[in-house]
């Protein structure tokens, strides 16, 4: 077979740009705009942000390259990929990934549902002219309504299923190419606005001046887990997307571009949100409701706020969609490749089952609010913590060990150099993936568990 003309029975991105946009679409999501600001707020800012960026560079980029290499080399879903390369217990790494995709998507749809609800509020003009105190209450009343949350969760899941039904190039790629550029634009507008508002300087100081005392083991684990979550790593999403990439694509280049875009969006979201927090004397450590309580405040005060609000929440929904489709794609790819299901059946059935698993998350703020799990957290926050801080880093650790120690150099290098001819940084990558990434992840794990 001509190496540049892999003829897929599976999907394939139509271009390098399509691959970049889809991967960036997967990476950029609620993690950047909803989660990054609120966990940064809870862990005291600067030091957390810098450690997060360090994790992206030292652990994230190398592992993203590894996942894409494994995916493209095997042209399979995560389970099939590990089975093909080595099999035995390593297949479990693929399994861990598919399971993580299932679990993460279940609660991801609930939070994305909040964004859809806010989009609806914006369309109705609810924010405009509201008193500053009244705006955060909108969020409280949303969380108090189990039915609304279930409804929007279902709407969002239906949209995800609909796109994934369209297939790799017609569904996933088209949706991403359309939504990603607009997202960047609107975020830049909001960030510039934030910078020039009264709380701007304080927000910048909060985000970028490190107070290393605040970086304890819990914060480090959170930052590292979030690096995995934000870059969609550790569960085979990038592996699956890599499996649809053309042989001529320069993988390190794509991975680096995607990581830079993802980091920029997170920082921009912080720069858009924290000035409002400081201008209106709100608490940076407000938790998961932060974005929904802060940004609508400026929407309620500024001229043309309704329009900007509509744009912003539309984009938040888009960002969430381009990520949720990648989560569903991992599960669907598994059922198509390994179980030979038809794509349509796999998408609809799995979408429905994942929706059901999400129901307790949707109810976790009201009906099930008194049921506590990890450290007094509700169901949603507990499985988010479990998936992000433990399953993804564990998956990432195993992928790094696999690539660095089990996969032969000839194989890894050969795959990378199909698209990155004479890849000079190969030794750097190999060193990072073999030693640095696994050791770092292990240290953070162990220090959190108190063994270190
Ligand atoms: N990266 C996505 C976000 O930041 C979430 C995600 C995690 C997507 C894992 C796919 C796989 O919102």
Image (spheres, rainbow, N blue to C red):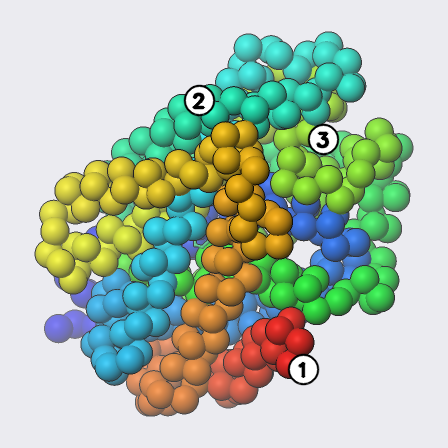
Figure check: 82 above or below 410: above
> In the visual, does 179 lie left or right of 297?
left
Label 2 belongs to which residue? 147
Q: Residues within 10 Å of mark 1 (few under 14, many from 20)?
A: few
Q: Sequence order check: which comes first, mark 3 or mark 1?
A: 3
Mark seen at residue 452? 1
Q: Give me the disc on residue 294.
A: 3
Q: Residue at x 21, y 38 (%)?
A: 348
Residue 282 in view here: yes
Question: Nearest the camera: 423 or 334?
Answer: 334
Whole-percent x, y for residue 433 in the image = 50, 81
Q: Is residue 183 visible from the viewing direction of this image?
A: no
Ranked by sequence position, the earlier of labels 2 and 3 is 2
Q: Residues within 10 Å of mark 2 (few under 14, many from 20)?
A: few
Asked whether 167 or 37 is in front, the reply is: 37
Q: Tell which of 400 and 373 is nearer to you.
A: 373
- Note whether ligand 1 is within 8 Å of mark 2: no
């Amino acid at each position: 077979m001509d190496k540049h003309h892999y003829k897929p029975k599976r999907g394939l991105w139509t271009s390098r740009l399509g691959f970049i946009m889809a991967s960036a679409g997967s990476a950029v999501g609620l993690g950047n705009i909803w989660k990054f600001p609120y966990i940064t707020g809870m862990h005291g800012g600067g030091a957390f942000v810098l450690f997060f960026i360090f994790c992206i560079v030292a652990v994230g980029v190398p592992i993203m390259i590894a996942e894409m290499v494994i995916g493209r080399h095997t042209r399979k879903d995560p389970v099939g990929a590990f089975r093909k390369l080595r099999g035995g217990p390593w297949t479990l790494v693929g399994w861990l990934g598919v399971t993580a995709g299932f679990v993460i998507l279940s609660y991801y749809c609930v939070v994305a549902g909040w964004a859809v609800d806010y989009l609806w509020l914006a369309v109705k003009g609810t924010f405009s002219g509201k008193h500053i105190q009244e705006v955060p209450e909108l969020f409280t009343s949303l969380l108090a309504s189990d039915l609304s949350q279930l409804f929007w969760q279902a709407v969002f899941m239906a949209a995800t299923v609909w796109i994934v039904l369209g297939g790799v190039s017609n569904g996933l790629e088209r949706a991403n190419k359309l939504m990603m550029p607009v997202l960047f634009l609107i975020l830049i507008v909001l960030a510039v606005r934030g910078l020039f508002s009264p709380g701007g300087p304080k927000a910048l100081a909060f985000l970028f001046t490190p107070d290393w005392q605040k970086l304890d083991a819990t914060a480090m684990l959170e930052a590292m887990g979030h690096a995995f979550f934000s870059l969609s790593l550790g569960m085979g999403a990038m592996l699956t997307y890599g499996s649809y990439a053309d042989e001529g694509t320069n993988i390190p280049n794509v991975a680096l571009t995607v990581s830079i875009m993802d980091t920029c969006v997170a920082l921009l979201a912080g720069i858009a949100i924290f000035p409002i927090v400081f201008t209106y004397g709100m608490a940076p450590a407000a938790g998961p409701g932060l974005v929904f309580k802060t940004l609508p405040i400026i929407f309620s005060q500024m001229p043309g706020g309704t329009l900007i609000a509509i744009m912003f929440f539309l984009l938040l929904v888009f960002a969430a969609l381009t990520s949720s489709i990648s989560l569903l794609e991992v599960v669907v790819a598994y059922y198509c490749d390994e179980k030979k299901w038809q794509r349509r059946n796999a998408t609809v059935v799995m979408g429905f089952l994942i929706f059901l698993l999400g129901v307790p998350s949707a109810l976790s703020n009201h009906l099930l609010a008194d049921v506590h799990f990890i450290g007094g957290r509700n169901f949603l926050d507990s499985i988010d913590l479990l998936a992000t801080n433990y399953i993804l880093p564990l998956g990432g650790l195993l992928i790094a060990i696999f690539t660095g120690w089990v996969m032969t150099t000839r194989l890894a290098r050969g795959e990378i150099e199909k698209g990155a001819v004479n890849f000079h940084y190969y030794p750097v990558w190999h060193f990072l993936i073999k030693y640095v990434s696994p050791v770092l992840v292990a240290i953070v794990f162990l220090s959190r568990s108190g063994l270190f």
